[in-house]
Image: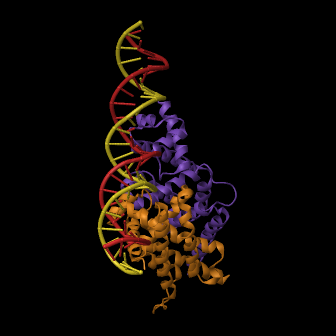
Chain colours: A purple, B orange, C yellow, D red
Amino acid sequence: MQTRKEALVESLIACLLERGLADLSLRPLAAATGTSARLLIYHFGSKEGLLVEVLEAMQAQLRQSFSRLLQRPPAKGPAKPPLKLLWDWALAPKNFPYLKLLYELQVLAVQNPDAYAQYLQRNAANWSGLVLALLPAQERDPAFATLCVAVFDGLFIELMSTGDRKRTTQAIDRFIRIVGDARATRADA
Amino acid sequence: MQTRKEALVESLIACLLERGLADLSLRPLAAATGTSARLLIYHFGSKEGLLVEVLEAMQAQLRQSFSRLLQRPPAKGPAKPPLKLLWDWALAPKNFPYLKLLYELQVLAVQNPDAYAQYLQRNAANWSGLVLALLPAQERDPAFATLCVAVFDGLFIELMSTGDRKRTTQAIDRFIRIVGDARATRADA
DNA sequence: CTTGACCTGTAACGAACGTTACATGTAACG
DNA sequence: CGTTACATGTAACGTTCGTTACAGGTCAAG
C-alpha cells in the first residue's frame, strides 16, 4: 500500500507528457507536482531511478490501452484495416501524448545512447512488436512490416510537427488503398 | 575574409554532427574544437547565436548537396524512381549525419518549441519542400506527397535506430513496387 | 509516554552552466 | 614607435544542476 508514491508517479507521468524528456530537471518537475526535489530523490533514489520508474509506469499504461485495442470486438460496418485502427488509436487524446514521448525518447537515444537507450529497450522495442501484432500473419514478411511501421512513424511525426490531422489521415488512407490496389494486380498476374 | 570564424564553423559543424543538439554545452564543445568557451561567445555572441550560424551553414551545405542530386545527369541503365534516388542520397556517408541532426531537431522542437522551433523554420520546412521537388508533377497531390515523405521519414528513423540498412532499403523498394502495381490496377480500371 | 519507521522541510554542497570583466597578445597602419 | 582593431587567455560572476546532511515532523506499536 504505497499510495504516496503511486500518486506521485501519476503526477510525474502527467508532467513528463507535458514537458518531454530533454532539459528535464528535478526542481521544476517537483514544483509542478507540488513537491520538492528532496522528495523526488527520497522516493526514487536518483533522477535516473525516477525516469526508470515513471517511464515503466507509462509504458504499462500504454500497453494496457493497446491490449484493449486488440481485444475490442470488431466494430459493425466494414472492418477497418489494421493500420487504420492503429492510427485512430494513436490519435486518441489519451494515447497521443504517450506516443509523442516515445518518439522523443527514440530520437534522443539515437544521438545520446548512453543517457537514453536504457529506457528504450523497455519501450520502443516492445512498441514495434506491438504494431506487428496488428498485421495479419501473411503480411508479416520483414520488408512489408517495416514499411507499415515506417508509414505509421513517418505520418505520426508529420502530425506532431504540423498538427495537420486531416492531411496525415488522408495519407494513411491513401497508403491503405494503394496496398489494396497492388494486391489486386498481383492477384491478376 | 573571415577564415578564422569560418574554420571555427566547420569544426563546430563536425562536432554537432557527432554530439547532437540535446545536452549541448559550450565548454565541452570548445574543448573538442580546440578553443575555449570564451572564444565561442566572442565570435557568436551567445550560445543561441552560435547555433543559428552553425545550423545555417549546415543547411547550406546540405542544400548544395541536394541540388547536386537534382542536377545529376540521369544514370545509365533503368531510371531510378525518385524516392530511391533520395534514399541513396540520404544514406551517403556525407549526408547521413546531417539528416540525423535534422530529425533530432524536428523531434526536439515538438516538445520544446520555444528552444528549437526557430531553427526548424530554416531547415526542416525547406526539407519537406525539397523532397517534393523530386516527385513528378502528377504525383504531387497532398495525400500522396505526404505519404512519400512519411515513408522516407519513417524508414530513415528506423535506420537510425536499428542500423539495419538492408531491411530498410528492402522496405523502400517494396513501397516503390507497391505504388507501381497500384498504378497498373488503376490504369486497367 | 517512548520508540521507531516513514515522511518532509531547510539549507547547503560541489559541479557545470552561459556569460562577463579585465588584461594581454598580435599584427597591420599612421 | 604608437595607435588601433582584432583575437585570446584567466578568472570569476550568478544561476541552476543533482544530491546530501541534518533536523524535525507524523503516527501506529510497544
In the picture shown, does residue B28 fall above or below A14?
below
For residue B8, say whether it is visible.
no
Using the image as rendered, state which of residue D13 and residue C14 is in the foreground.
D13
Which percent across, then down, holds residue A54?
47, 43
Number of marks in the rendered image: 0
Q: Residue furthest right?
A: A77
For residue B49, say whether it is visible.
yes
The image quadrant of residue B3 is bottom left
In the picture shown, does residue B86 fall above or below B52?
below
Which percent across, then down, holds residue B184?
60, 82
Using the image as rendered, state which of residue A138 and residue B54 is in the foreground.
B54
In the picture shown, does residue B131 fall above or below A8?
below
Using the image as rendered, state which of residue B19 and residue B37 is in the foreground.
B37
Which percent across, then down, holds residue B183?
61, 81
Q: Residue drawn at (49%, 64%), measured in percent from left and top?
A: B49
Q: Residue drawn at (48%, 41%), measured in percent from left and top?
A: A27
Which percent across, then down, holds residue D9?
30, 61
Quadrant of the snapshot with the C terminus of chain A: bottom right
Using the image as rendered, state which of residue A26 and residue B36 is in the foreground.
B36
Left or right of residue A170: residue B79: left
The image quadrant of residue A171 is bottom right
